[in-house]
Image (cartoon, rainbow, N blue to C red):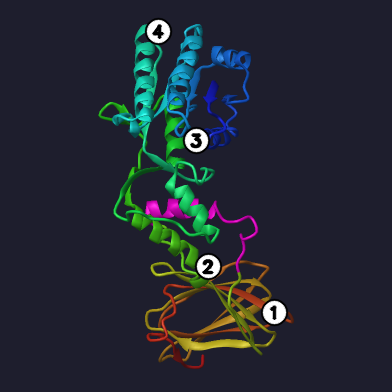
Amino acid sequence: MNIVITGSNGFVGKNLKEDMRSMTNYVIYEINRQTSTREMEQALLESDFVVHLAGVNRPKDDAKFKEGNVDFFSQVLEILKRNSKKPTVLFSSSIQAEKNNPYGESKREGEAMLRQFSKENGNDVYIYRLLNLFGKWCKPNYNSVIATFCHKIAHDEEIQVNDRNVILSLNYIDDVIKEFKNAIEGQPNLENGTPTVPNAFKVSLGEIVDLLYKFKKTREDRKLPKLDDLFEKDLYSTYLSYLPKDAFSYPLITHEDHRGSFTEFIKSPDRGQVSVNVSKPGVLKGEHWHHTKNEKFLVVSGKGVIRFRKIGEDEVIEYHVSEDKLEVVDIPVGYTHNIENLGVTDMVTIMWVNEMFDPNNADTYFEEV
């Protein structure tokens, strides 16, 4: 199938074309500002499906709205009238089409042109009135407050919030791309007969700002965001894409002594925490048990033994572990346990515990195995 993407270098266009490059059943034709009239005509006449994303939304002169959003689209449709394959046309409109402003009016006129084109020529068409979009590769300081705030907060710049209570209607870019691909396959998501991108979010500007600052702080407190909250998960992925290129890494706090070291990696209120434990040769750690706290150990370097004894009983259970066979050992409640390095090199163990450490409720009781 020959797919034409107009506005292929824009935010949505770039995400769509890069996602579809790996799909061998599609031939992608790009139309952007560098495309000649001849190249554009050739692509449109060979197309089976056209995703029309090209347009303007923040010109210096309002007259450019008609030029970029109406006149250019009219030119595209005139060429498509000569395509005997009658390609399906997907039009990227906006919720602004519901408003009486120059941008909204130009989008509304584009919708009307496409409906008339479909009526006269018989082409199938999909009109998507997109919400405010967010995600990777969106240009900051342009027309997306989320892109701007992500960029500024990640770069330690001040932001200006005029009204924290403003509610934004949002779609995540990955949901948009998935829906457009569904439409290309002839299976659009319809709500009351209208093509619609699923997973619309309604979030206040204040909530967004608070989340972004929380994401920034995660490098200090090592806490993960709530990844079971779809909006928070999508916003976190978006924020990370705006990190400065020289700031992808960040240090952790390592606690060292003669036995080795212990370093907290990540923590989550509802998913526990992950740490890295390093034991020197011959060192034994642990010798304690828990009521409710449970753990998982994974030795990734070196070799050793993990021992257990159920409280009140005498039997000692041993599990030998090493880098040669990666396997997880559960540390059940009610068993005192230890871990000993039996090798001649440092033993590195990844440790997960089901709750973050609380010094006021450690749930840790000393008893030798």
What residue type is disc 1 on? Asp
Q: Nearer the viewer, mark 3 or mark 1?
A: 3
Q: Nearer the viewer, mark 4 or mark 3?
A: 3
Taking the magenta stretch, the answer to whether it contains residue 221 is no
Residue 75 sits above or below residue 340 on the image: above
* Residue nearest the observer in this picture, 330 or 318: 330
Q: Locate residue 207 relative to residue 137 in the image: left or right.
A: left
Residue at the front extreme of this rendering: 61
Residue 188 seen in this snapshot: no
What residue type is disc 3 on? Val
The residue at which mark 1 appears reads as 346
Question: Which one is earlier in the sequence, the residue at label 1 or at label 2?
Answer: 2
Element carrying mark 1: loop
State which quadrant residue 192 falls in: top left
Answer whether labels 1 and 4 touch (C-beta < 8 Å). no
Question: Which one is earlier in the sequence, the residue at label 4 or at label 3?
Answer: 3
The residue at which mark 4 appears reads as 121
Q: Dot 4: few (<14), some (14–19), or many (≥20) neighbours within 10 Å?
A: few
Residue at 39%, 70% (x, y): give it: 269
Q: In whole angstroms, how far apart are the C-alphas of marks 2 and 3?
A: 30 Å
Element carrying mark 4: helix
Q: In whole angstroms, how far apart are the C-alphas of marks 1 and 2?
A: 27 Å
Circle count: 4
Label annotation for residue 219: 2
State which quadrant residue 356 falls in: bottom left
Q: Bounds of the magenta span?
A: 228-250
The residue at which mark 3 appears reads as 12
Q: Quadrant of the N terminus?
A: top right
Element carrying mark 2: helix
Taking the magenta stretch, the answer to whether it contains residue 241 is yes
